[in-house]
Image (cartoon, rainbow, N blue to C red):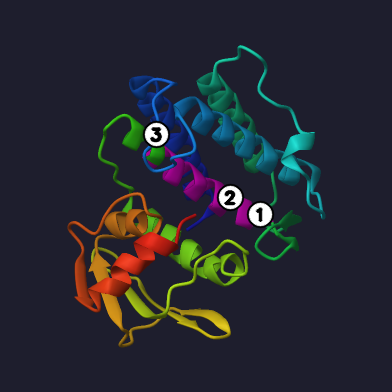
Amino acid sequence: MDTSEYLDAVMENAALFVEAARRAGLDTPVPTCPKWNVGGLATHQGRVFRWASALVATGSQEFIHPKTLEEIGEGEDPLLWVVTGAEDLLRVLEGANPDALVWNWFVGGPAPAQFWFRRMAHESVVHRADAEAAAGLESHVEPAELAADGIDEFLHFLPVRTKDEGFKTPSGSYHFHTTDVEGEWLVNFHAQGVSVRREHAKADVAVRGPASALELFLYNRRGPDGLEVFGDEAKAAAWTEKVRF
């Protein structure tokens, strides 16, 4: 996807986030993020927008701790905090060179700023789904190409995330396949960690379906309903139990 599509995704999903959050109410628990209510989710989203803005705007080659940045003011509306954070982020990204080197957590150092265009698009998608879950709404990721791109990003984060002390690694191999747009991935958990390849191959379990449903399933933002599961269904359940971002 190109940078303009990522910017559109940030803008559209931030607006949908606010709409769903207002419908839910700030004190409503977020079922997909049990530690937060809607107000806490909004505060997090606004903080992440500002963090990405600071990294890209300054061209930082090193990590900037989010706690060193502006925090939401006492009594400030968390949803306004999201709106202004999204506006600032879009302004920064629109003026940025996607090829400029900026720190990111995936490589632990400087890499093309394109990372943050993509990351903020999918960050916005997933937390919009969280806000919709709190409001009792069903989520869909559109267009399908955005959802497939989100799957690709998510799966390629796994080798980094499995190094986290609290990560509960599943076992065996998984094949994920989108049915409405092109996309196939083989994920193999093994003694040395995890490997991810874009290919069609036999695995212990295969999960296939529309890109939107598959992305939200992988992120644990929905169950397997409407997805086809072939092979070891216990491994599909293990994904839900263990792979939580």
Q: Say if mark 2 contacts mark 1, CB within 8 Å.
A: yes
What's drawn in magenta, residue-wise?
A: 113-129
Q: Is residue 174 magenta?
A: no
Residue at image position (53%, 29%) is 40
Q: Foreground: 115 or 45?
A: 45
Q: Is residue 100 visible?
A: no
* Tag 3 secondary structure: helix
- Where does label 3 land, which residue? 131
Q: Quadrant of residue 146?
A: bottom left
Label 2 – label 1 distance at C-alpha: 8 Å
- When the figure is inspected, residue 204 is found, relative to residue 135, above or below; the finding is below
- Main secondary-structure element of the magenta-colored stretch: helix
- When the figure is inspected, residue 164 is found, relative to residue 175, above or below; the finding is above
- Where does label 1 land, which residue? 98
Q: Is residue 119 magenta?
A: yes
- Where does label 2 land, which residue? 117
Q: Position of residue 231 (x, y in %)?
A: 22, 80
Label 2 – label 3 distance at C-alpha: 21 Å
Q: Please count the marks in the image.
A: 3
* Tag 2 secondary structure: helix
Residue at image position (40%, 35%) is 30
The amino acid at mark 1 is Pro
Q: Quadrant of residue 27?
A: top left
